[in-house]
Image: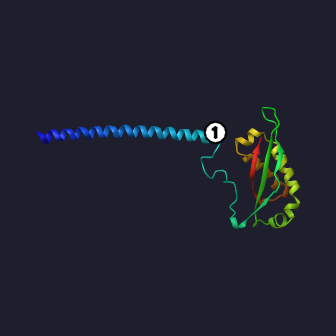
């Protein structure tokens, strides 16, 4: 009789343990889903890319040893296109051009003072490109459209793709 009573108590405790474990798992899983949803919403608001590597798919494969950079030293204050609010907005930006040293046009345009001699023309293209966008458009895609537009204009100017990427060291819109 004592063995049966002991077995019934053990079985009852086992069932209680199973119920508590189920309740804990359900509450932890639902909390985890809610936390993941909140993080996803925050990332959407901040316009972060959750899928890594999609932004750089169109870039050519250039090793770091074959890459040269040209920094436009001075920060540029550029007027932006008027947005929905009708106010004047400006971008304060520092631009870097990334070049492929293995490209055949690099020797003609990218080495030495050749690119420095064209810096004022490049600055003009950058100002023109920024002037086509509103502050809201630039903020919506973190400036990717402006970068692509600037790159396209510079590649058209040189009639070459030795400059394969444009980056912003600093960008402030106001």
Camera-side residue of 53 and 87 = 87
Image location of residue 53, percent across then percent down? 63, 53
Q: Residues within 10 Å of mark 1 (few under 14, many from 20)?
A: few
Report the colour scheme: rainbow
**Toward which corner of the image does residue 80 lie, by quadrant?**
top right
Q: Name the residue at 80% across, 65% down.
A: 106
**Toward which corner of the image does residue 132 lie, by quadrant?**
top right
Camera-side residue of 82 and 164 = 82
Q: In screen coordinates, is 5 left or right of 157?
A: left
The answer to whether residue 96 is above or below residue 85 is below
Q: Name the residue at 72% across, 42% down.
A: 139
Image location of residue 122, percent across then percent down? 85, 54
**Toward which corner of the image does residue 119 lie, by quadrant?**
bottom right
Image location of residue 64, percent across then percent down? 69, 65
Q: Residue furthest left?
A: 1
Give the number of marks.
1
Task: Identify the residue position indicated by label 1 in the image.
Answer: 45
Image location of residue 33, percent across then percent down? 49, 39
Q: Dividing the image into 4 quarters, which one contains the N terminus?
A: top left
The answer to whether residue 85 is above or below residue 29 is above
Q: Secondary structure at mark 1?
A: helix
Q: Name the residue at 75% across, 51% down.
A: 170
Q: In screen coordinates, is 24 left or right of 163?
A: left
């Amino acid at each position: 009789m004592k063995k049966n009573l002991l077995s019934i108590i053990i079985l009852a405790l086992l069932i209680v343990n199973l119920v508590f474990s189920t309740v804990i798992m359900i509450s932890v899983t639902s909390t985890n889903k809610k936390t993941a949803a909140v993080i996803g919403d925050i990332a959407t608001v901040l316009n972060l890319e959750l899928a890594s590597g999609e932004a750089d798919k169109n870039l050519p494969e250039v090793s770091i040893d074959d890459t040269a950079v040209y920094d436009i030293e001075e920060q540029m204050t550029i007027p932006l296109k008027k947005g929905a609010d009708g106010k004047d907005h400006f971008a304060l930006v520092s631009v870097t051009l990334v070049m492929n040293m293995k490209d055949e046009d690099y020797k003609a345009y990218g080495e030495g003072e050749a690119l420095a001699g064209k810096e004022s023309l490049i600055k003009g293209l950058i100002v023109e490109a920024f002037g086509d966008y509103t502050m809201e458009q630039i903020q919506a895609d973190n400036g990717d459209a402006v970068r692509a537009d600037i790159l396209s204009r510079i590649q058209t100017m040189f009639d070459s793709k030795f400059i394969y990427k444009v980056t912003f060291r600093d960008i402030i819109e106001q």
